[in-house]
Image (cartoon, rainbow, N blue to C red):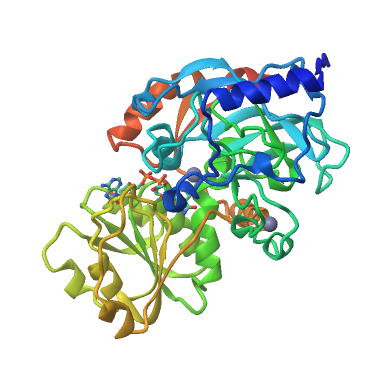
Amino acid sequence: MRIQIITSDQRKLMNEKTVATGFTTSNWMTPLFDGPSVSNSDDQSAPKNEPREMTTEYKFQGWMGLDKDSHKGNLVFQEFEPKRFEDGDVDIKITHCGVCASDVHTLSSGWHENVEYPICVGHEIVGTIVRVGPKVEGGLKVGDRVGVGAQSGSCLQCKNCGDHKEPYCTGKCGFIGTYDARHVCGDRSQGGYGDYARVPSRFVVPVPEGLPSDIAAPMMCGGVTVYSPLKKYGAGTTAKKVGVIGIGGLGHFALLFAKALGAEVTAISHSDHKREDAKKLGASHFIITGQEGWDKDNKESLDLVICTTNDAKMPLESFLSLLTPGGVFVLVGIPEEPLPQIKPFSLIQRNVHLCGSLVGSPAEMKEMLELAATQNIKTWIEPYPMDKVNDALHKFHEKGMRYRAVLYNQKHIDNQ
Ligand SMILES: NC(=O)c1ccc[n+]([C@@H]2O[C@H](COP(=O)([O-])OP(=O)(O)OC[C@H]3O[C@@H](n4cnc5c(N)ncnc54)[C@H](OP(=O)(O)O)[C@@H]3O)[C@@H](O)[C@H]2O)c1
Ligand SMILES: [Zn+2]
Ligand SMILES: [Zn+2]
């Protein structure tokens, strides 16, 4: 492996250049609420001016967004600088990467204005480990088939990190996204629409043998984001009747996993188009929100609702009215605008719990993958060669995806 070391002076120059370009740092979600997040590179614990490898025998290159129009299908293939390789890191030769709606929100700067371009998005990664640091967690080794989701870092020291709740890290760095973020060392994170990914091992999970890589990839974000709240709020146990709003990437997983966990499942979609699919995915009931009286007809029929829609103008009051007293409404979809206002009594009168949920922890990812492998749960995918990623983005915007685009690197599949 060819390694080039750079000196601390060179590194300093690079840092200054970064500042000069006006880069701000942003961890994946934080800017939605607070504006640009605090720079991790200011962290006193961050290694400063350390020698840095610039090249390996393989190149970090991928399909990058150069500006906020890139989400329309204008990604360009080019090299990028990975984070510096630290002792707990692994390098992954990417075979597959799902296309999540969050990739599009990020490419378009739809959630916040501080996205650093060029950016390589993609956080439903599966591939083979080609390099491990001396301090990797979980016994990971070269040759392992693994996955990475939307989170690639956290402080690893706070109570939540210790309790396997890494998405809710309360350390200074907080949630560090697989792209559009800075690692604790100060280097940018870059995602999986490319050839290789460099990721701290805590956030790298083995893919069980029985689960094909294309099926597993979208589970890394889309799957676990719904699996986590389904499990947490008792789908199939305390919550017998589960509703899923929005039958897209996340929504189709929510139907599959809610059914697998033993719930009676209702799909809630804006039109009739996905009725037959929803049935095959495990739904026994189908509600069309475009139909007159849909809310009154289904009042207090669900114990738990997972809401995946992107629509900021969603009929939230009506959605809440579907819940039984004490029911739980979990928001996982992240519209680019604030949610509709609701009347206080919509929550109070029936003791409705309204909450949100962010991706899932590595432990939950492992649990979900085991369930998927043992119950033969299959993602519905539309495969695209990696170099046709712009076609996948076009199809995404046409809202025609059934239900997840998965990019694949044939050259890496052939050489596994
Ligand atoms: N909380 C988290 O940690 C997390 C993780 C991943 C993704 N997300 C977010 O979850 C949301 C869904 O992601 P996804 O990948 O499942 O997206 P998707 O595949 O595009 O699915 C979204 C679904 O929402 C419904 N919808 C209704 N009105 C819509 C509108 N105006 N625009 C778009 N969709 C509308 C559609 O279903 P029907 O046709 O059935 O109505 C659509 O299929 C995104 O906002 C994404 O950023 C959140
Ligand atoms: Zn995602
Ligand atoms: Zn933490």
Quadrant of the frame with the C terminus: top right
Q: Relative to 208, is 344 above or below?
A: below
Query: Residue drawn 72% across and 38% down?
Result: 185
Query: Residue drawn 67% across and 21% down?
Result: 14
Quadrant of the frame with the N terminus: top right
Between 110 and 367, the one nearer to me in the picture: 110
Between 81 and 359, the one nearer to me in the picture: 81
Number of marks: 0
Q: Position of residue 337 (x, y in %)?
A: 31, 50
In the rendered structure, the answer to whether residue 180 lies left or right of residue 33 reads right
Query: Residue drawn 24% across and 69% down?
Result: 317
In the rendered structure, the answer to whether residue 348 lies left or right of residue 90 reads left
In the rendered structure, the answer to whether residue 132 lies left or right of residue 406 reads right
Is residue 206 visible in the rendered structure shown here? no
Between 408 and 63, the one nearer to me in the picture: 63
Q: Residue furthest right?
A: 134
Is residue 401 visible in the rendered structure shown here? yes
Residue 101, picture quadrant: top left
Q: Position of residue 344 (x, y in %)?
A: 28, 78
Query: Residue drawn 88% across and 37% down?
Result: 134
Residue 269, picture quadrant: bottom left
Q: Position of residue 22 (x, y in %)?
A: 51, 28
Q: Relative to 91, is 10 above or below?
A: above
Q: Relative to 82, is 370 above or below?
A: below
Q: Position of residue 183 (x, y in %)?
A: 66, 39
